[in-house]
């Protein structure tokens, strides 16, 4: 083959000519495919979530409870707000540790009511089964709350009245046992607490003429004197606790004026005489706050008992005649009264029923009993004589409704004397103020005590007994 023929058959080298891609191909199409795929996936996910939401049960969007108030007063509430309605007659609720509760359902809200105060320093678990309406499923809800450790203020007197010593108010943490002084002054007669305030009554000398002061603890701490009639003796200082008020009785020295009951709101400074059914200042022989409220139960000199609002917002209500006011069942509106027998007057229903007295084992007598400290337990202080002829005392917990059915949990130290007993607001703890052997009286004029008194706290649920705390006459007693 000639060279010209070879050249004619060789490929021609030069720039490559690229053909345009056919319509519908290239980066634009790939992007459209990706967007379409994403949209389809999102649509499927949304459909799945919609289906899942249509099948799931109610969820809790808000849980509301006040642990402080719930551990002081019966009848408090734990509310659960839901994102959808639930079937009211199929809702199941339980509380652990076990506390009797009732539940009501209104729309998207479940309301759980505690039938007694909760224990201090305890974590409670609320279990709720919430069936949805229609095709909705069932939810099993778990919520928790922890109640406060609890504190009490003990009065520690420095010595005999007139010796010039400074008395102290000791804030005492019930769980840890830590104490700190939060107030000090001479001649302290009584102390009451309505957080964050204390009320303190001091006596001037042997005649007992009183001065009253409120003290705010925590942020904005400080004290403020409360104006009282000159020359009056102040006594029966008490607190409504969660109700936020104080009350006290004044007696004008050197006159025939009857004892008058006063109410005081430390937050606003409002104070005034409490009026009776006739619109005149009520004459108070004895009185109590209804737990957790501002209402008062007042016994007049004719032994009639009245339910009174200190600010006159509701009419005065008669409660009949009774020889003695014992106290309220802790945290409730059930008033213990004593006539020939002891009975319970329910202020909510107006019903009254008689109580049976605790029975003592052979050889012992009931020295003191705190009937209905809780529905399940009654602490009973028993006194008896042992085989050697020595008088002994011990504290027994009576369980249930019949017989003693309990066990001794604490023995009064030999030679010591229980001079005062008080219950915590929720009825869980019993305070026993114990004077040592041979303790001398402190000589205070209105609320006398014994030198060297110490307080022992007994947990009525577990039977656990604390080490002695310096002081006594705590705010639980007022």
Image (cartoon, rainbow, N blue to C red):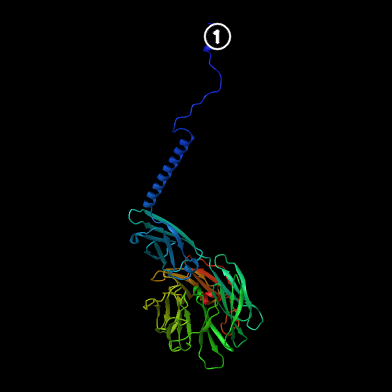
- Relative to 207, say whether 402 is above or below: above
Q: Is residue 390 visible?
A: no
56 or 113, nearer to the observer: 56
Splitting the image into 4 quarters, where does residue 450 fall? bottom right
Total marks shown come to: 1
Q: Is residue 90 visible?
A: yes
Question: Picture quarter containing residue 138?
Answer: bottom left
Where is residue 153 drawn, in percent x and y? 57, 73
Query: Residue 281: where, in percent of width, then height?
Result: 48, 88
Residue 278, position as x, y percentages in the image: 43, 89
- Estimate the x, y position of residue 45 in percent, counting from the top left: 42, 45
Q: Residue at x 54, y 10 (%)?
A: 6
Between 163 and 350, the one nearer to me in the picture = 350
- Residue at the outermost top position: 1
Q: Nearer the viewer, residue 271 or 212?
A: 271
Badge 1 density bin: few <14, some 14–19, many ≥20, Cα 10 Å: few
Instruction: In this rendered view, identify the residue nearer to me: 52 or 478.
Output: 52
Relative to 6, is 367 above or below?
Answer: below
Is residue 112 depicted above or below 328 in this figure? above
Task: Find disc 1 in the rendering and name its residue.
Answer: 4
SS at circle 1: helix
Q: What is the residue that sits farthest to the right in this orientation?
A: 164
Q: Is residue 159 left or right of residue 366?
A: right
Q: Residue at x 58, y 71 (%)?
A: 171
């Amino acid at each position: 083959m000639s060279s010209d023929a070879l050249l004619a058959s060789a490929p021609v080298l030069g720039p490559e000519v690229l053909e345009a891609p056919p319509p519908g191909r290239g980066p634009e199409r790939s992007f459209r495919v990706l967007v379409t795929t994403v949209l389809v996936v999102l649509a499927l996910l949304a459909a799945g979530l919609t289906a899942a939401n249509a099948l799931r049960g109610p969820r809790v969007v808000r849980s509301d409870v006040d642990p402080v108030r719930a551990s002081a007063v019966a009848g408090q509430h734990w509310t659960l707000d839901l994102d959808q309605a639930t079937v009211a007659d199929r809702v199941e609720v339980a509380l652990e540790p076990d506390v009797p509760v009732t539940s009501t359902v209104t729309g998207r809200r479940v309301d759980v009511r505690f039938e007694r105060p909760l224990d201090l320093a305890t974590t409670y678990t609320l279990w709720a089964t919430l069936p949805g309406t229609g095709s909705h499923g069932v939810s099993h809800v778990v919520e928790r709350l922890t109640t406060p450790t609890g504190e009490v203020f003990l009065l520690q007197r420095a010595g005999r009245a007139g010796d010039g010593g400074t008395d102290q108010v000791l804030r005492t943490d019930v769980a840890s046992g830590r104490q700190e002084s939060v107030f000090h002054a001479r001649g302290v007669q009584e102390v009451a607490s309505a957080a964050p305030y204390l009320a303190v009554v001091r006596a001037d000398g042997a005649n007992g003429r009183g001065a009253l002061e409120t003290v705010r603890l925590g942020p904005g701490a400080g004290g403020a004197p409360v104006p009282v009639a000159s020359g009056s003796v102040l006594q029966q200082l008490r607190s409504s606790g969660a109700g936020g008020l104080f009350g006290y009785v004044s007696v004008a020295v050197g006159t025939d004026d009857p004892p008058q009951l006063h109410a005081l709101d430390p937050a606003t400074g409002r104070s005034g005489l409490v009026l009776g059914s006739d619109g005149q200042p009520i004459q108070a022989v004895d009185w109590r706050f209804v737990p957790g409220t501002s209402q008062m139960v007042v016994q007049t000199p004719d032994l009639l008992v009245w339910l009174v609002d200190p600010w006159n917002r509701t009419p005065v209500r008669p409660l009949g005649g009774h020889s003695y006011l014992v106290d309220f069942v802790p945290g409730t509106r059930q008033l213990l009264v004593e006539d020939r027998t002891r009975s319970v007057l329910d202020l909510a229903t107006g019903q009254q029923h008689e109580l049976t007295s605790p029975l003592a084992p052979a050889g012992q007598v009931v020295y003191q009993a705190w009937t209905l400290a809780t529905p399940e337990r009654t602490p009973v202080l028993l006194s008896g004589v042992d085989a050697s002829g020595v008088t002994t005392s011990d504290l027994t917990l009576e369980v249930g409704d019949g017989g003693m059915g309990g066990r001794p949990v604490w023995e009064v130290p030999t030679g010591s004397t229980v001079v005062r007993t008080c219950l915590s607001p929720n009825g869980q703890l019993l305070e026993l103020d114990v004077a040592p052997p041979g303790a001398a009286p402190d000589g205070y004029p209105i609320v006398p005590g014994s030198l060297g008194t110490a307080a022992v706290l007994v947990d009525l649920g577990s039977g656990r007994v604390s080490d002695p705390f310096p002081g006594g006459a705590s705010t639980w007693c007022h």
